Structures are given as C-alpha cells and as structure tokens.
Image (tube, rainbow, N blue to C red):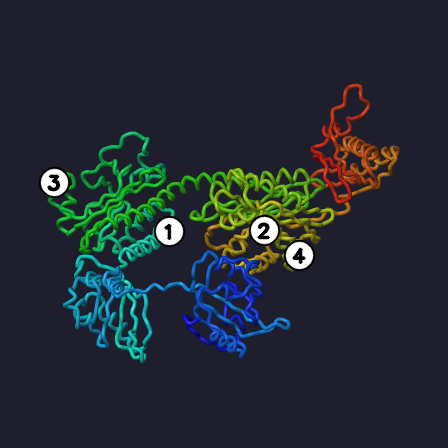
Amino acid sequence: MDAARERPEAPTSAGPSALFDASTDAAAVVSGRGVVLGWTRAAEELLGRPASETVSTPVAALLAMPGDPVRVAGVTERCRAGMGWSGLIAVRHRDGRRIDVDLRVSASFRIGADECFLISARERRQQWAVGQSVLDGFLTRSPVGMAVMDTQLRYVWLNDTLERFGGVPREQRLGRRLSELLPGLQADTIEGLMSKVLETGLPVTDYEYVGWSWADPHRRHAYSTSFFPLVDPDNSITGVCYMVSDVTERWHARQLLSLVSEAGTRIGTTLDVLRTAQELADFAVPRFADFVVVDLLEPVLSSEGHGAWLPDAGPAPAKPVMRRAGMSSVREGCPEAVARIGERVDFVPPPHGAHLLIDGGPVLIPVLDPSDALWTTEQPARSASIREFGLHSLISAPMRARNTALGLTTFIRSLNPVSFQRDDVLVAQELVARAALCVDNARRYTREHTAAVTLQRSLLPQALTGGTALEVASSYLPADPTGGVGGDWFDVIPLSGARVGLVVGDVVGHGITAAATMGRLRTAVQTLADMEMPPDELLAHLDDLVLRLSEEQTGEEATDEEATEAARQGRTGFLGATCLYAVYDPVTRRCTMARAGHPPPVVVAPDGQVSFPEPPAGPPLGLGGMAFEAAEIELAENSLLGLYTDGLVSAADRDMERGMARLGDLLSRRDCDLDTLCSSAVRRLVPAPQPDDIALLLTRTHALGAEHVVSWEVPVDPAAVADLRGRATRQVESWGLGELAMTTELIVSELVTNAIRYAEPPIRLRLLRDSRLTCEVADASSTAPRLRHARSMDEGGRGLFLVAQLAHRWGARYTPVGKIIWAEQEIP
C-alpha cells in the first residue's frame, strides 16, 4: 500500500452513512484476520467476482499491488481506535485488469465474538483538465460577448464577440468607459448596474434592453446582459465581468406575440362589421403603421352577402368593388386618404388585380416610388398622396376567412423612417387574419341569430294553462344580440287526476344549436310526462336523451370527465342542460319535484313567508350514469310557486344567493295580480339586457276540495259492480253533469270489473270534477293494462276498447303501492 494516499477520517455523529454510500459503492465485510465475510452485488460488478468465490477467502488476494504488513497494521490499529481510514489503492479484476479505487475502512465493530471491518470502494475516474489554449479559445470565440471592467468601469479585456456586437474596435475600447463609446445603448443605465454590483457584490442577471450600435446603425437590437463581481482571494472586489447576448430575434418574437395577444382583446369586441374594421385600423396606428385603410367588398357590408368570390365561383372582375370600412392615421383627419368611410374604392397595389383578394398573399413594397409608371398610370391620386405626405413603405394584406374573400387592408409608413421588413409581413398577416375572422363571424352571426330567434319563438309555449289546480303566469326575456339566442325553456303540462306538471330548463350554450336542443328537450318532457313518469324517472330518461344527442354530435361516446368539462366550458359537440320538473296534485296539495343541476324553486306562503325548498340537486343532464332523487312538499292553498333559470338571479352581480333573496322579496308582495308580479320581478331584477336568456314561471296553487272529489272502496266481488255504477251515476247527476251519466256508468263498470278480475286488492274508485270529469280505479297490482281488439266470437276483451271510445283520453300511472287506471271526459 506504499502507493496509497491516506486520508484519516474522524468518526461523525452522522454514523456510517456519512462515511460511505452502500447503495452506490462496492462494499465488503472483512474479519480481523483479513478474511472476507460479506460481499455485495456492487462489489461483484466492480471486480467481476461472485460472492460464492470471494467469501471466506483472504482479502489480500484481491489487491493488485505488493503487500505492506506494517502499513496494514497501522490502518488496523487506527480503525480499532474508532477512526476510519481512506486512500487510493489498486485492486485486481477477475479478468486481470488493474482498477484504481478510492477505499474506505470503517471503525472496527463486532459480530458476535468476531472483530469486523466494513470496507467500501469506488472506482477512480480520471478528471479532464482544461488546457490554457482551450480556455483562451472558449473566451475569445464564445457566441456570448464578454468583457472585464475595472473599478472605474473602464474596459480591461473583451472578447471578439463583444467587439463585433458594438462595432467599436478593441483598441478604441480598452481603457475607456461604455458611455464614452456607445451613448445610444442605454450606457448610463448599464453603468449604474455595474456600479451596484461593485457596491453590493451581488450579481445582476438577464437584464434586457434595446438600443442602436455602430455595427448595425439602421436597426435596433435587443440584448440580454448579466453582471458578476470579480473577487480576489481576500474577498475584495477588483472589477466587474459582464456577459451579453444578442436576443433580437427572441425580442421581436415576444413583441409580435404581445402585439397579437393584445389585438385579440382590442379587435372584434362587437358583432358589427364596420366597427371591427375600424378597430383594426385604430389598433395598428401608431403601434405598427402610420396610416391604415380597411376596404371591404360590397357584399360583405350588405345583409345578404356571403362575401365575394369563392375559389370555385368563376373568374373575378379586373377591379374589385369595395367600400372604405375603416381608416386611421397619425395625422388628424387622415389627409393621406383619397376616399372616406363608406365611399366606393377599387384599390389594390399595382400590378395586382382582384385575384389578390381571392388567392394572393400579402404584398410588401419596402420602398414606395411615386414616380413609378404603374402608380402614376393606375393610381394617379394615390401617387400624388405618396409624394405629398412622404409615404415610403407599404404592406397590403388580403382579408379572407373560411374560404371567403372579404376585402383588403393596407398598412403604410411615413413618419416612421424604418421601412417594413419581411418580419413585419407576418405581423400584418396575423392582425388581418384575426380581424377577418371577426368580420366573418359578424356576417354569419346576423343570419344565424335571425334563424335562431325565429326557431326559438316557435318552440316556446304560446299559451299556458294550469286548469283549476294552478293560476299561471310567465315571463321570458331573450338575451341581448351579442349574447346570442339561448336555450331557456318552460312549460305547464296537464296530467291525469287534475294534476299539473311544471318544468323549467336551461340548455348550455347559445345559438341555433341551443334553440334546437331546447325544442327537442321540451318535446321529450311533454312525451315523458304524458307517460305519467314520476319526476326522478323523467329526469333519468331526459339525461339519457341528452347523452345520446351529445354522442350524435361528437360521433363517439364521451367519458363522464370529458362531458363534465365540456359542459362547464360550453364547448360545441357536447350538449348539457339543467332542468327542474315538478308535479302538483290539487287534491293532496302536495308537490313532488326533482332537479338536474338547476336552482331550487321559490315558495311564498299565503302569509308572505319565503322559502327555497331544495330537493337533491342531482347532476346536470348529459353526464349519464348518475341517479336523480325526488322530494315532496306540501303547499297551502294560494301559495306562490316560482320556477326560474339562473340568469334571473345571477344577472346583477353573479351572486346566486343574493339574487334568490331579492327574488323572494319581490314575490312576497300580495297587492298585484300574478301577471303583473311576474313581469315586474323580471324587470326589477334585470333592468338591462343580459348575455343570457331569462325565464320565470309563477303559479298560484288551488286545492280541489271535498265537494269536487268522491271515492269508494271496491269489494273484491263481481256483485259490487252494480252498486258502484249506481253510486257513480248519482254523484255525476248531483254535480249537474247528467249528460255524462250514461258514459260514466259504462266507464265505471268496465274499469271496476277489470280490477276485480285481474288486479290485487285493495281496490278504490274515485271521481274528480274540475275542468274535466275523471274516473280513477286504483289497485295494488303493477301489471299494465293492455288494449286489445276482441274477435267477433269472443265473450270478453272489449272493456278497455269501450273505455277508449267513450273517454276523451285514458291511461295508467304507477304509484308506490300499485297503479291507477284513469279515464277523462270533457264537460259540456
């Protein structure tokens, strides 16, 4: 071990882990007699010797150097004293190679009665040394400019790159300050930063600035600079080193991104074609150009236009017919313009024609020459304007969107001495593309909005009636034109047994798709309600329908997470809606309701007390796979029940709870009729147009008293049918409906007979008189009745067929304990 370099190590409180890392180093356990007791996988990999060959062998056999008993004894004694040892030794790989390793020996410890040492080793890797010539080449030829300044901020050394950046020879820089050489490069600010580094000793990194240099005096460059103090071994600051990179391209890209990003918020704020054209011109002056004109094709400005020529629409005329839609200038009044807003123009930069608008790219003229023959011949008025106002550079960009030609935007510089470059064409192209899309959106919106409004008005109920159970009033406020037609809807659906179904819903999104979806959902609710479904089951079927409609639009099934996120963002392709459905029974005065992500109803008791009963919210429609729950409340006679969409209560300040409280206060007034109360509540809650539709459905409940309802228990005995026929006939006549006595007798006879024959007791017969005369037979069976046509020789099977012929309408509905067969007759 005479070649080893020893490094004695004192024990530390960190324990053995501070001396070696067994997870990365080769390790072995050696007995006090020098025999290997343990061998790790890392040791196998380092020396290529498996544990089976190494354990129980002398550790000296692994060395690739002569033995030194005296040195070994010294190391052993040191380790027995509680201090470790480390050094560089050579070991032998199984294949004969010599490997230099950093060896560490731990303090001795015991395993049972044996004294042991833990040995760890790591292969020594050769360090690469940087030669002076390499270092000099790196500093001199680095793509980053470097310089060293003394404490007086005078140049002491600089590399070739910095000399090239500034355009000032090295000989003229050395011994002088930056402010003496490049005064147009924010020299005072840069020297202030270097002085701060000298004072504080803290570096300044990534300071960006823009300026001119002698290397390129006609173009501004952007630079990123970092400053570091130079420190002597005694920690005294002897100067400043600074490093600078030319980041002009990155700076231009960031400026372009910033300009385009700002344009997205400043151009197209309204769905008005002329306003959008003017916003483009105003935004570009003076940020980008000194004079901007926006000329649009005449069909674009008309309400009937789809733009000018499409690529397959045949040849275009030599000169396009356009009108000036917007313009702006750094000079007040735009004296450069040869046409004013609204006037006809036919300008395209010569020698181009109308095809420039259809399939041409942006035109860049870095230097405008007013004496050019093409300009003096084809555009004499503009040639004179170029000469008079010093217009010297031009970009004309066609405006196209969705395969439709819209017009031409022209950017011109005059007071700004820098001509347009190729990079500027990209900026112009992006600005015009954004404006073109907004112009096209405005055209399309006008047509779609008209169609959607027409469709929506045709789908909303034209008249509402709650029969004798409810007094009904409604108010609907469409969204303002910029918000687009929404998908709010409401309905009142007469049900059997004098009951009434109430529904209000809101389709996510706006436009003709939302209006069409609203119509489909309203029709579906009416159909499901006619099938006598309870509210929670109705919403479950409606949820399936919305899910299927979404799949039809996307062409594939969406996961719950995708549907939820799409519904939250209102993305096209996913449909979503909220809904509340309630059923009011005037006999029991109970209202059963369920909701799918919709605000709860408002109830105003006869004494003016306001409440918002909250049935389980349930998920919005269109997510699928989630259950809905129904809740039941009892309403006192003459209670006010209100159903509404969220736009009504969140329109003022987007605070739902405060909006609901205000709605309750407004509806608690008892001094006006229902229609006036409904319209005034909407008007006061939403005094100004809103971007969302608003619907309010108000009902005042009535009870169907005992004088309008009568019922009898039905014994399970065919002989009881005659008695019940007589009772029903006498009751109908006592109500003054003698004209219906015979048909009522036949209907009662058939329904009661069927119940006795085929149903389960208990059985009950009930007659109701409101706007119609209703006969109901309830039983404990869940078997659905079936209308069939009996053959001529059959003795039965004609009961329900007769009922269907005699009644205005008939049907069945299920209850928690069975079913009810009902039949209604019109009262003369």
Q: Quadrant of residue 143?
A: bottom left
Q: Label 4: which residue?
A: 605
Cα–Cα span, label 2 and label 4: 22 Å
Label 2, residues with CA under 10 Å away: few <14, some 14-19, many ≥20: many
Q: Label 3: which residue?
A: 373
Q: Is residue 370 left or right of residue 77?
A: left
Q: Quadrant of residue 672?
A: bottom right
- Residue 598 is marked as 2
x and y percentages locating residue 699 in the rendered image: 63, 49
Counting residues from the start of the chain, the first of labels 1 and 3 encountered is 1
Image quadrant holding the N terminus, namely: bottom left
- Residue 269 is marked as 1
Front position among marks 1 and 4: 1
Q: Is residue 750 left or right of residue 418?
A: right
Q: Nearer the viewer, residue 724 or 90?
A: 90
Image quadrant holding the C terminus, namely: top right
